[in-house]
C-alpha cells in the first residue's frame, strides 16, 4: 500500500564561512539543530555550501585565479573524511535527513575537485553521493566532470528523494531519469550569484528568473515538491574576494541573486521566497498532493511513448584506476577507490526503478 507522509522541510538560505571548511561545517550543524527544533525533518543546503561557491572565476581572468584555487583545494572535503562525518553525526543526533553541497577532493590528486552533494539519512547513513555531471561555463576552471553513479532517487521514510545541482536542473534527460525513478521530493541547489558579463553590462544572465523557471518546470512536469536552495551574498564573501584583489562589491552590485523557495507538484509556491538575507525557510508538505496531478500528465507512466523513446543511464562510477588486487572491485566505491560500508548501494540485480537500497 502506498503511503504519503506529510512533514516540514527546511531550505537553509544561509551563507558559508567562505573558504573555511571547519567553520562552515560547524555552522551547518547549528542550522541543522535549529531546523530540527522548529520541526523540520528534511534540511537542504545550497550548492557548494562547504566551503563556498568559487565566484572569483567569473570576475577575473583565469591567469589570476591560482591563489583562490589553491585556497579552495586546501579546504576540499573527502566523502569519507571527518567533515562529512560531522554532518552525518548531526543528522543522526537531530533525527533529520540532510542534503548538503560541497567541493570534493580526492587522495588520488591534489588538484582534482568536484562540485558534489551528499544526502544523509536521519540515522547518519549516507543515502546518496552525487557529483555534478558537467560544470557550467566558467565552473570548468575549478571542477571536473562527475558521473552517473549518484544520479538516483533514494527511498526514505520521507518519500523518494532526488536532487540535482544548479545547471543540471536544465538537463531534461537528468531530470527525466529522476522522475522515472519515482521521485516525490526534488532538491535543487544553486549559488549565491552567477555573473556572465562585466559590471555595468546589459543582458547579464538572470539567475533569479532562471531558478524560478527551472524549479517550476520540474515541479510541474514531475508532479513533485521542489526544495530550491541558494546562498545569499554576505560581507565575508565580498571581503575574501577583495583579499584576492577582486572588487567584488562593485562587480556584483547589480547581479541577480540566487533565491530559495519550496514549490508544490503543480509548480505553485509554498510560503515565502528568500533572496538577500540569511534565513531558514520552512514549509509543510504533504506527498499526497503528488497524486492528483499525475492523472493529467504522468511522463513516467501513461503520458509517454516508451515504444518511441528509450533512455539508458550509465550509473557506473568513473575512477582513474582500478587495481586487480582490490577485494572491493565489485562494490560501489568512494572517490579514492575504497569501498565504504556505510554507503547504501544496490546490487546489480537491484539496480532498477523501484529497488530499495539495502543498508550494509
Image (spheres, rainbow, N blue to C red):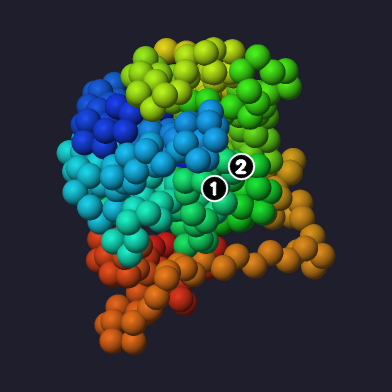
Image marks 1 and 2: residues in contact by CB distance under 8 Å = yes
Whole-angstrom CA distance, mark 1 to mark 2, is 6 Å
Could you say which disc has been placed on residue 68 in the image? Answer: none
Extreme residue toward the bottom, this view = 324
Residue 23 located left or right of residue 197: left
Q: Nearer the viewer, residue 288 or 27?
A: 27
Whether residue 188 is situated above or below residue 327 in the rendered picture? above
Relative side of 78 to 298, left or right: left
Residue linked to disc 2: 137
Q: Which residue corresponds to the image point at 42% horizontal and 69% vertical from the top-left?
A: 319
Q: Residue 234: horizontal and vertical position, in percent?
A: 39, 17
Please name the residue shown 39% across and 20% down the image.
242
Who is closer to the viewer here, 275 or 90? Answer: 275
Residue 97, percent across and down?
A: 33, 41
Q: Residues within 10 Å of mark 2 (few under 14, many from 20)?
A: few
- Figure check: 299 above or below 95: below
Residue tagged 1: 140
* Quadrant including the C terminus: bottom left
Which residue sits furthest right?
A: 308
The residue located at (41%, 41%) in the rendering is 66
Tell me if residue 18 comes above or below residue 76 in the rendering. above
What x and y, as percent, mark residue 176?
65, 52
Q: From the viewer's perspective, tell me whether residue 211 is left or right of residue 245.
A: right
Are there few (<14), some (14-19), or many (20+) residues within 10 Å of tag 1? few
Helix, strand or loop at disc 1?
helix
Q: Secondary structure at mark 2?
A: helix
Left of 284 or right of it: where is 288?
A: right
Quarter holding residue 356? bottom left
Amino acid at each position: 500500500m502506498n503511503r504519503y507522509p506529510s512533514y516540514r522541510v527546511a531550505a537553509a538560505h544561509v551563507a558559508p564561512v567562505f573558504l573555511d571548511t571547519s567553520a562552515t561545517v560547524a555552522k551547518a550543524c547549528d542550522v541543522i539543530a535549529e531546523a530540527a527544533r522548529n520541526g523540520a525533518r528534511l534540511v537542504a543546503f545550497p550548492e557548494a555550501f562547504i566551503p563556498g561557491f568559487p565566484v572569483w572565476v567569473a570576475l577575473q581572468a583565469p591567469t589570476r585565479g591560482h591563489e583562490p584555487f589553491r585556497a579552495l583545494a586546501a579546504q576540499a572535503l573527502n566523502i569519507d573524511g571527518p567533515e562529512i562525518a560531522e554532518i552525518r553525526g548531526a543528522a543522526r543526533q537531530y533525527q533529520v535527513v540532510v542534503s548538503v553541497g560541497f567541493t570534493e577532493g580526492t587522495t588520488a590528486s591534489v588538484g582534482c575537485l568536484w562540485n558534489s552533494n551528499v544526502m544523509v539519512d536521519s540515522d547518519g547513513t549516507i543515502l546518496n553521493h552525487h557529483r555534478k555531471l558537467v560544470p557550467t561555463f566558467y565552473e570548468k576552471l575549478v571542477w571536473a566532470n562527475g558521473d552517473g553513479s549518484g544520479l538516483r532517487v533514494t527511498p526514505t521514510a520521507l518519500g523518494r528523494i532526488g536532487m540535482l545541482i544548479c545547471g543540471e536542473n536544465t538537463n531534461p534527460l537528468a531530470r527525466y531519469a529522476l522522475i522515472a525513478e519515482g521521485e516525490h521530493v526534488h532538491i535543487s541547489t544553486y549559488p549565491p550569484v552567477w555573473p556572465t558579463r562585466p559590471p555595468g553590462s546589459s543582458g547579464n544572465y538572470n539567475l533569479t528568473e532562471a531558478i524560478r523557471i527551472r524549479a517550476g518546470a520540474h515541479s510541474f512536469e514531475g508532479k513533485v515538491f521542489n526544495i530550491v536552495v541558494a546562498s545569499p551574498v554576505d560581507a565575508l564573501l565580498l571581503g575574501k574576494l577583495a583579499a584576492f584583489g577582486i572588487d567584488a562589491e562593485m562587480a556584483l552590485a547589480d547581479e541577480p541573486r540566487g533565491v530559495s523557495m519550496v514549490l508544490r507538484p503543480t509548480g505553485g509556491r509554498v510560503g515565502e521566497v528568500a533572496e538577500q538575507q540569511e534565513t531558514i525557510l520552512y514549509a509543510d508538505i504533504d506527498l499526497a498532493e503528488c497524486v492528483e496531478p499525475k492523472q493529467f500528465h504522468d511522463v513516467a507512466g501513461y503520458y509517454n511513448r516508451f515504444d518511441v523513446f528509450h533512455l539508458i543511464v550509465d550509473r557506473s562510477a568513473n575512477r582513474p584506476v582500478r587495481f586487480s588486487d582490490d577485494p572491493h572491485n565489485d562494490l560501489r566505491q568512494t572517490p579514492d577507490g575504497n569501498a565504504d560500508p556505510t554507503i547504501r548501494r544496490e546490487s546489480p540485480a537491484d539496480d532498477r526503478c523501484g529497488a530499495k537500497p539495502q543498508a550494509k
